[in-house]
Amino acid sequence: MPISFNEKNQVFKLDAGNSTYAFMIEPNGYVAHLYYGDKIASDAFEYLYRRMDRAFSPAAPGTTSSESRDVIPQEFGTNGVGDFHAPSAIIRQGNGHTVTDFKYRSHTIRRGKPSLPGLPATFGSDEEVDTLELSLYDEASDVEFLLSYSPFAKYNAIARSVTVINHSQEPVRIEKIASAALDFVDGRLDLIHLPGAWARERSVERHPVNHSRTVLESVRGLSSHQQNPFFALAAPETTETSGEVFAATLLYSGNFAAEIELDQFNQLRAQIGINERTFEWELRSGDRFTAPEALLVYSRDGIGGMSRTYHDMFRNHLIRSHWKDLKRPILVNNWEATYFDFNEKKLLSIAKDAAELGIEMLVLDDGWFGKRNDDHTSLGDWFVNEEKLKGGLGKLAGEINKLGLKFGLWFEPEMISRESELFRAHPDWCLHVPGRGASEGRNQLVLDMSRPEVVDYLFQTICKVLDSANIEYIKWDANRHLTEVGSAVMPADRQKEVSHRYVLGMYELHERLLNRYPKLLIEGCSGGGGRFDAGMLYYVPQIWTSDDTDAIERLKIQYGTSLVYPCSTMGAHISDCPNHQTGRINPFATRGYVALSGTFGYELDLNKMNAEERALIREQVSEYHKYNHLIAQGDFYRLTDPFDPRTVVVIWEHAAKDGSEALVTMVQPRNVPNGQLFRVRLRGLDPAGVYEEEKSGVCYTGEMLMNAGLNVPRYERDGAGELFHFIRR
Ligand code: DGJ
């Protein structure tokens, strides 16, 4: 059993893949964190429990001065009894106080892993994962915390979540609840995180933690472009290929906070959960509240090792979609081809070209509904605009199907335009605060997804559309962040629940649609990659990575995204040049190499392609079919770093898990005239295997490619790119 409890030394030991996590019940009843790192067979961890009398570190009632919560690493931080770090929970009780003093009460260990009510969660069979539920109890408030730990047998990954139960007779208010806390005795680590912006999502930042509390957060209602719900703490010497990393991501698509705090003794507390700035929850007598799941990953093999564990975990234990392991249809999306200016004739003529070129699905983007000819109107009016599409979606989808293509459709379910029938009928259905105007973003307001009737309306209207035509894919967009987060139906003292209830409503709509249309392929989206998080991957197998479709910009965006998320989840399309976001002109072939490393598709007017471009599209389509199994199911290796100013050629590799083949992609963003010659070391090959590079016919041993490296060609132009396919002979 990968979870054990030793009665004698009171130590809990959790083994996850090649990692071990240990903590103990202290003689005083608190729960002290002892170890997280490489696998250790023994459970005699009690020697790591150290007590020390420290100045200005008071001890909680009933404990001695050497047992201050300020000094002893905790499993979950208490509040107001001497632990001066950010608490893991704040519970306001009937008497107005928030002091809580949680101690061990009991525990259970079971096979498998329960799902979380209304929330995304990793899953696994009884053979793949076990679960420890640790009960902590605060006698004075009569409130219990159930800390859940699920180590996965095959991966260095532990899923954690927390449930709060109010056993008292009166309501309490949860003002803060972390999903996981992680204390380190030596916290002199580097923090790695993924800040960004629209069109520049998930750039990688790394810096040593300092003596302060750093908060990585979103208060935008969605997980956001600006910060991803993820952090990694790496030893200073850790690189892409070696060294220790401790990482956490939150399976949550709303306001999150990750707090990283280095204290006076260089001890560190890192925790992640719902953002307390926009959260509060009234917990009535007898009720329970479950916080979202956090997924911890440990790597001894550098940042790359951490990424591959997340990739495998998401592909095998998080994504549920019918499409999870299936090759996704190559799509053409009309957005950058037509924007709002299309009709049935234009779409069919794109579809005709698509069919000739081997493209498999046409996706009709924004503008097909209500009176929407620009972004000022009609969100919420999910019925077809027959002026644009005569005969409706059924006819259009039928014609497209006749050409041999699937048909997909764009929705932005959570939004409402002031200029819409829906707004006229239900002006109070949008998030708003009485007496204040509602801020607009992209000329639109946000529906109050915390209201069941709003979710019902959306479910019914979307079903009606989906039942009216053969629609096999939807793109679920969300093009603004949340403001005036107030609900017309929540009582005044519970308005701070709305942000979280919004996320729960959005998840519920997904769940209901998935239950009704289990084979529907859904692509998540939020103005590009503004909701690229592990929570969404429970409902959708792919997410549009960024509105920035420039292949050179995508090198950084896809690199940063790959730190946590597998390539099979990254929406990536070949778009037109000059690129609509940057004005840059990149070679058509290179645009293909970059898009191939995601879900792959086109976002341009196929009717405008010349003979050379059409030939290239045919080639790219066949490359997709040839390589997609490696990209979607293989191991991903980042070989050079586009954020490093010394990088001249950006190089990455997709290797088959059995080492039988590998695809290496090289792209040179800018030519360095008369520049240096480079070699690049490949990874994940069989050292003794002989690999033939398909194009050149040159053979190398795996050992040569991984130790001496492959010669990187001298490319003589900006944006040059190339694929290398290695097959073991
Ligand atoms: C933002 C998305 O990211 C784009 O791809 C496109 O669907 C537009 N919204 C449509 O409004």
Image (spheres, rainbow, N blue to C red):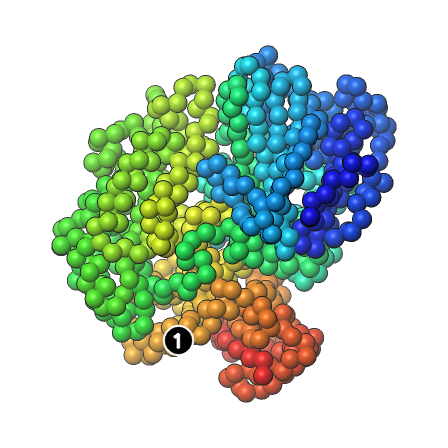
Q: Is residue 250 left or right of residue 237?
A: left
Q: Which residue lies at the image location 55% right of the left edge and 14% below the top edge?
A: 169
Q: Nearer the viewer, residue 218 or 120?
A: 120
Q: Quadrant of the C terminus?
A: bottom right
Q: Amino acid at mark 1?
A: Ser
Farthest-out residue, top: 95
Q: Nearer the viewer, residue 647 or 705?
A: 705
Q: Nearer the viewer, residue 587 or 330?
A: 330
Secondary structure of the residue carrying numbered label 1: helix
Disc 1, ligand 1: is the CB inside 8 Å? no
Q: Is residue 346 left or right of residue 103?
A: left
Give residue 449's quadrant in the image.
top left
Q: Is residue 380 visible?
A: yes
> What residue is disc 1 on?
622
Q: Which residue lies at the image location 57% right of the left edge and 28% below the top edge?
A: 164
Q: Is residue 207 visible?
A: no
Number of callouts in the render? 1
Placement of 85 over or under 348, stated as above or below: above
Q: Position of residue 296 (x, y in %)?
A: 62, 46
Q: Which residue lies at the image location 53% right of the left edge and 27% below the top edge?
A: 288
Placement of 264 over or under 281, stated as above or below: below
Q: Position of residue 719 (x, y in %)?
A: 47, 71
Q: Which residue lies at the image location 40% right of the left edge and 68% below the top edge?
A: 585
Q: Nearer the viewer, residue 678 or 453?
A: 453
Placement of 184 over or under 702, stated as above or below: above
Q: Position of residue 629 (x, y in %)?
A: 48, 68
Bin the neighbour count of mark 1 within 10 Å (Cα to Cα): few under 14, some 14-19, many 20 and up.
few
Q: Position of residue 446 (x, y in %)?
A: 35, 36
Farthest-out residue, bottom: 697
